[in-house]
Image (cartoon, helix red, strand yellow):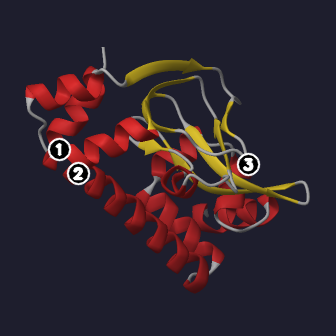
């Protein structure tokens, strides 16, 4: 059990067998159905999750409208990160979009790993860097690119999403209506 996470770590920065043994004692597995909310707005995030199989969406809800902000799939971490790291109420929802298997680690165990293991701290930093880069690239695209460019960027860099994520979520992520996304796709595919 937990082999996919061990393989992921080994590609990033190998943990010693002792470090891995300590870390895996704090892991547990969850199997969730599609459309299961993992983190609710207003609740404090207590866990960091690693996706073994399936997909997860992060979104905000305002005046009854959902705003998709990220999608995560196999071999990626997911959480309401600001809530987790600050231990304050989340402003976002985290929800499965497919039947999903996750490993989870509780916040305090994660912080202990970061503080007591150089390899653990390195893995935490590498994950944070990946998330920061993704967030900055998305922000730049939303601010600087037109709808066609945003879609082409998604097509180039996250093509898997187009096969696995419902189109209305993709439209929300790209900051356009589903109708605009349909017109953009028609223009690009013609």
Residue pointed to by mark 3: 41
Q: Quadrant of the C terminus?
A: bottom right
Horizontal side, residue 28 vs residue 152: left or right: left
Q: As displayed, is residue 74 above or below residue 175? A: above
User: Of helix, strand and loop, which one carries label 1?
Assistant: loop
Which mark is first along the chain, 3 or 2? 3
Q: Residue 188: where, in percent of width, then height? A: 59, 66
Who is closer to the viewer here, 48 or 77?
48
Label ID, residue 82: none
Residue pointed to by mark 2: 121
Q: Is residue 184 visible?
A: yes
Q: Residue 151: where, in percent of width, then height? A: 57, 66
Does the CB distance between marks 2 and 1 fall below 8 Å?
yes
Does the CB distance between marks 3 and 1 fall below 8 Å?
no
* Structural distance between the alpha carbons of marks 2 and 3: 28 Å
Does the CB distance between marks 2 and 3 fall below 8 Å?
no
Q: Residue 149: where, in percent of width, then height? A: 55, 75
Horizontal side, residue 38 vs residue 61: left or right: left
């Amino acid at each position: 059990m937990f082999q996919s996470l061990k393989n992921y770590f080994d590609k990033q920065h190998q943990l010693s067998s002792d470090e891995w043994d300590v870390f895996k004692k704090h892991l547990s597995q969850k199997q969730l159905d599609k459309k299961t909310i993992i983190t609710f707005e207003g609740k404090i995030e207590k866990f960091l999750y690693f996706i073994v199989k399936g997909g997860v969406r992060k979104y905000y809800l305002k005046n009854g409208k959902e705003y998709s902000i990220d999608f995560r799939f196999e071999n990626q971490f997911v959480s309401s990160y600001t809530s987790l790291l600050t231990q304050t109420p989340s402003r976002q929802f985290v929800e499965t979009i497919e039947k999903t298997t996750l490993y989870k680690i509780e916040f305090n165990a994660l912080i202990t790993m970061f503080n007591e293991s150089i390899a653990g701290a390195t893995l935490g930093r590498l994950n944070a860097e990946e998330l920061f880069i993704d967030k900055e690239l998305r922000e730049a695209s939303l601010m600087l690119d037109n709808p066609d460019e945003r879609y082409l960027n998604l097509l180039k860099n996250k093509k898997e999403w187009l096969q696995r994520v419902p189109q209305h979520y993709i439209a929300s992520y790209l900051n356009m209506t589903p109708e605009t996304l349909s017109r953009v796709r028609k223009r690009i595919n013609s």
